[in-house]
Amino acid sequence: MNCLSDFIRIEYRYLPSTLYCFVVVSLFFYFIGKTNKKRYYSYLFFILSLISIIDIILLIQESNIFLDPNKTFSGEFGGKSFRPTINETSLHIRCFDYNSNGGEKTIIFEAGTPFYSTIWGNVLDNLQQQQQTNNSNNNNNNPMNKIKQYCIYDRYGYGWSDLKYKSNRNKGIEGIEAVNDLKQYLEQIGINDHLILVGWSYGGIMSQLFASQFPSIVDGILLVDSMGLMDLTDTFLIKLINQGINSFKVLKYILPSGITRILTPLFPLSSGYLDSTIDLSDSLKYSNNLIYQSFNNIDASKNELSIIFDSINQLNAIITNQNNIFGNSEYMGNKSLVVLTAGQNGTPDWINLQFDMTYYSSNSVQIVNNSTDHFVPLHGSQSIVNAISLCIVMSN
């Protein structure tokens, strides 16, 4: 009964599945009583009904994953989840203690689209191993000891965060509005200074926008194979993002049928689905892939893809204004800025394009990891931890 009540409580997202099941079952019983010619339709609707019923049974069994992030993180990673709320919209933030007695810095991780907190699992594992090593060696001089805590979170609609719509329900929340909201959410849980922002891919745009809006509370920025101004003219990327928007639109309409469970082997990594070959905690992959097949996640992915270039244009306006007034692009001033670049990204001149981001601060450096592709949190997590350490050193 608890599972059933949880299923009913999960907002609107599974109501369409229930209604679809009712319709196909009704059509099955309708056609089974017809003539032999029309009775063949009953076979089709029997199969669709069976898939739908299995889907709903699984949804009921899995409902606790959607409602409680502790089911995903607590056993393996620990930490504490917070659900600060603004105007009845809650954001999920999960924080992990590092050196709560002597540290002062808080690491905030920003995922790329369409990923969220689960993508950082390997980085969390590396950080916890680093923490254990420091504790066992009593290494007080390690710059990582200046970390008080590190936090992952889910942007609107992803993971365990509520979906926030604009007046146009097909558009997401643009970058500056999203980071203004994030600051308020962080303040509600007592995080308001000495931030190190770690942004991967689109999360790099978000981290830069946050730093531009609230420079007094940011100590440093780590851009992990970040998107940038060069993407505004990348015709291949523009085409790819438009294809992604259309794919999520289609996925949304077939989701109630339960057929998406059969189609998962066709979902590429770039779509946010983590297949069995991905080297990541099983609990994180399991939860990620369940939430992937939910209306909130699909809407969040589709809507965020629709505003990516709007957010980049916001950053472009900030850098252009800096150039017009001061004759340079150092809008971050002398804040520590580490640009971690994936050497196997595949884009021509990618390393040079990434290097251009170092001009945003007078205190910056680029690191190239030639052993990883764009999915650095999955395939080069230790390099992220090393870059965080360097960012902290540079911020002192």
Image (cartoon, helix red, strand yellow):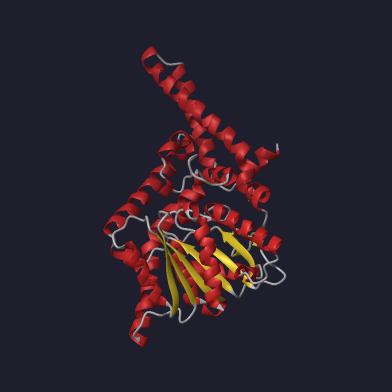
- For this view, does 331 lie left or right of residue 288? left
The residue sitting at 41% across, 47% down in the picture is: 248
The residue sitting at 33% across, 49% down in the picture is: 243
Residue found farthest to the top: 36
- Location of the N terminus by quadrant is top right
The residue sitting at 46% across, 22% down in the picture is: 30
Residue found farthest to the right: 101
Which quadrant would residue 58 be assigned to in this image? top right
Looking at the picture, tell me which residue is in the foreground, 220 or 95. Answer: 220
Residue 334, can we see it? yes
Residue found farthest to the front: 137
- For this view, does 51 lie left or right of residue 359? right
Which quadrant would residue 188 be assigned to in this image? bottom right
- Location of the C terminus by quadrant is bottom right
Looking at the picture, tell me which residue is in the foreground, 329 or 380. Answer: 380
Q: Residue 312 in the image: state x and y as whole percent.
A: 38, 67
The image shows residue 38, relative to residue 70, as above or below, that is above
The image shows residue 345, relative to residue 313, as above or below, that is above
Looking at the picture, tell me which residue is in the foreground, 25 or 254. Answer: 254
Q: Residue 219 in the image: state x and y as whole percent.
A: 55, 76
Q: Residue 212 in the image: state x and y as whole percent.
A: 47, 76
Q: Residue 40 in the image: state x and y as whole percent.
A: 39, 18
Looking at the picture, tell me which residue is in the foreground, 369 or 362. Answer: 369
The image shows residue 286, relative to residue 174, as above or below, that is above
Residue 110, can we see it? no
The residue sitting at 67% across, 39% down in the picture is: 3
